[in-house]
Amino acid sequence: AEYTNAISLDPEYIVLYSNRSAAFLANSEISKALKDAQKCVELDPGFVKGHSRLAAALFALKRYDQAKDVYQRVLESDPNNAAAKQGKAACEKELDRIAKEQQQERDEAFDATRNSQGEETPKADKADEEEDDLLNGFFEEVEEVVTKRKEEVAMAMAPTATNAIRNDRETLGTTESQIERLLQNHYEWRNLNPYYVLQLAATATDEDINRRYKALSLLLHPDKNQAKLTTEKDRDRAQLAFDFVKKAKQVLSDADRKRYVQSLVEEGMKQGEWKWAQEQKKKKNHKNDDASSSLEAIQEREVMKIFAEVEKKRREVEDRERKYEQRERQQEDELLEKERSERKFDKQWRKE
């Protein structure tokens, strides 16, 4: 109350806002602390203490990325600022913790696919049921697609890179066939596997990946196929297909992400081989002469299933984080509204 009264007498005195921000923060009134810190920076962008108050408020709101950036600005102005060094280190520690938790979530999703062996997970709500239905429809169509592309993974060998790309183009078919392949039903799930997008085995070298990317780019990039893409819809579909190819190349250009993708593919191949062996046993025991799925078809289905399950888990984590941020913003808005109401009441009371 004393700071508030003093500010009413001198609304431009920056130190008062700084001190009141610290008082609000100590009292867990984070939204108010943030607002006063922002006022400090607004009044004097060179006021280091104001930036420190702002970083502290952001940290309390768990906005660690923003807080870290503000602490860094403080250190640029005052390299020996101990509080800023400590604050930046705390932000980095929290960001590292969050990254590890997210990685653990992804690992748990991956492990769940390894242990499920066909077990169904309970449906949490209607939204989950709808997504499961979508996944089920996706899985039902996978084997059909696999049988159509047994010949599509052949790698062309040539003495020069130019000839290799040309040969790749010949094995990849036409622009229209590639667009149809990459934009068929449930393509958002199918194209999660970058090796599927590029039509390469997980053992492909960086040279193979670069060559295949160039070959597919020549087939799909709208600017290179203007004569074939006569309508705006055709160009939009070609662009979307090319975007998937570009994203696949970006993923496999990152060594860590490439290793992770390879581990998913490897696990899917193992699960597929195990399931194929189980089918063969059943067929033998029951003397069933009906045609069964090929090993290749089952392995590809399991690889795609793993990528889909991991993506589903990632979306669930992202949704939880989004809801948490929404609650946080709502609480902040409620605090701001409460503060406005208090100011309005105080103003009316003074007039009376």
Image: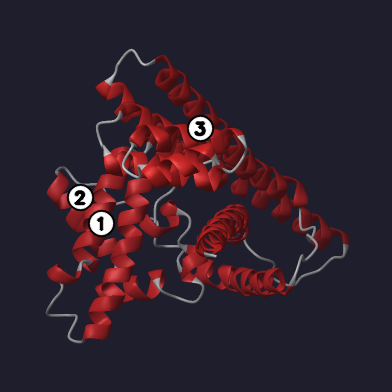
Residue 120 position (above or below residue 159): below
Residue type at the position of mark 1: Asp
Residue identifier under label 3:
22
Residue identifier under label 1:
168
Figure quadrant of the C terminus: bottom right
Helix or strand or loop: what does disc 1 sit on?
Answer: helix
Residue 179 position (above or below residue 273): below
Q: Is residue 293 visible?
A: yes
Q: Position of residue 94 (x, y in %)?
A: 54, 31
Residue type at the position of mark 2: Ala
Q: Is residue 258 visible?
A: no
Residue identifier under label 2:
164
Q: Residue at x 53, y 48 (%)?
A: 31
Would you call the spot at circle 2 few (<14 residues within 10 Å), some (14-19), or many (20 or more)?
some
Between the C-alphas of marks 3 and 2, the distance is 66 Å
* Side of 152 where 330 appears, left or right: right
* Side of 89 where 266 appears, left or right: right
Q: Position of residue 52 (x, y in %)?
A: 40, 29
Between the C-alphas of marks 1 and 2, the distance is 6 Å
Q: Position of residue 280 (x, y in %)?
A: 76, 57
Q: In front: 40, or 253?
A: 40
Q: In front: 21, or 249?
A: 21
- Lower position in the chain sequence, tag 3 or tag 2: 3
Q: Residue at x 44, y 39 (%)?
A: 6
* Side of 220 where 35 appears, left or right: right
Would you call the spot at circle 3 few (<14 residues within 10 Å), some (14-19), or many (20 or more)?
many
Toward the front, the furthest residue is 352
Would you call the spot at circle 1 few (<14 residues within 10 Å), some (14-19), or many (20 or more)?
many
